[in-house]
Amino acid sequence: MEKDYYDLEEREVVEEQKPKNKLSIKTQFETKKGRMRFITRVSMFSALSTVFYCWLKFPLPFFPPILKVSFSNLFVIIGSLLTGPIGGAIIVLIRFLLKLILSPTSTGFIGELTDVVIGLSVAIPSSLFYLLKHDKKGGIMGIITSFFMWIIFSFLINLFVSLPMYINLYGLDACISMFKAFASDINESNLTSIYLFYFILPFNALVSFVNCGLALVVYKKISSFLKMIGI
C-alpha cells in the first residue's frame, strides 16, 4: 500500500510538470486573465470578420454576382489559431448573427448559411492542428488543412444544399438566366456541373488560397503584437 501511495504521488507530480496546452479551453479559462483574453480576442476577431463580411467585399467580373471575394475568413483563421476550436466556432457564429442584424440578405439567407458551414470548416481544422501540435509546424499544417477543407466543404454544401435551395427559391429558369452571362451554353441538364466546376470550385480555390496565404504571412506578427500589448 505504501509503495502504491508513493507511485501515485510520483504520477501526480509528473502530471503537474507536463506543459499545459495554451489553446485548450480549460487552460484559457483557469484564470480571470485567461478568460478576459479569450473574450477579448473572440470579440475582436468577430468584429473584424463581420466588417469584412458585411461591407468590404467585391465581385469578380468572370463570376456570378452572388459570389463575392471577402477577407472575412482570414480573421476567422487567425482568431481560431489564437483561441482554439471553440473560439473559432464562436467567431463564425457571431459573424453570422451580426450579419443578420446589420446587413440585409441578398440570397434569402442561403449564402449566409453556406458561409457558416465554410467558416466552420476553416476555423476548426486549423485550430485543431495547432491545439494538438502547438508550434510553427502545427500552425502551418493547420492553415494548409483549412485551405483544402474550404474547397471541399464549399463544393459539398453547394452541391447538396445551396444550389437546390437557390433553384427552389428563384426557380430553375431564373437561375439559368442569372448564370447565362458567364456560361452561354448553360441549360437545365448541365446547370449543376457548370455551377460547381465553372464557378464554385475555381472561385473558392482562389479565395481560399488568398485568405490562407495571408494567414500564413501575418499570423505570427499579429500574435506577437497582441502579446506585446497584453491581449
Image: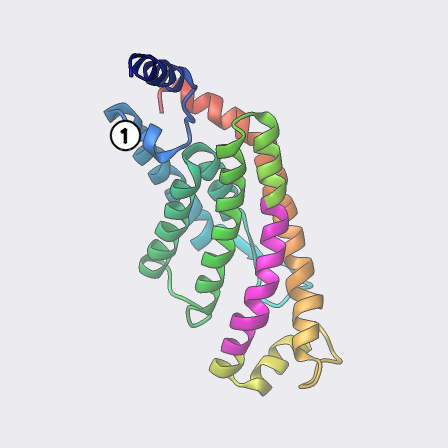
Answer yes or no: is residue 131 visible. Answer: yes
Q: How would you rate the neighbour count of disc 1 (Cα within 10 Å): few for under 14, some for 14-19, many for 20 or more?
A: some
| Figure quadrant of residue 88 | top left
Foreground: 64 or 146?
146
Percent x, y of residue 173: 59, 87
Q: Residue furthest left?
A: 32
**In-image side of 104 versus 69 (left or right):** left
Foreground: 160 or 14?
14
Q: Residue at x 48, y 33 (%)?
A: 131
Q: Residue at x 58, y 31 (%)?
A: 138
> Tag 1, which secondary structure?
helix
Relative height, residue 159 to residue 141 (above, below):
below
Percent x, y of residue 219: 53, 31
Overall secondary structure of the magenta section: helix
Percent x, y of residue 128: 50, 39
Q: Residue furthest right?
A: 185
Q: What's the residue type where badge 1 is placed?
A: Met
Q: Residue at x 70, y 85 (%)?
A: 189
Answer yes or no: is residue 55 visible. Answer: no
Q: Which residue is mark 1?
A: 36
Q: Please report the bounds of the magenta region as a residue range.
A: 146-166
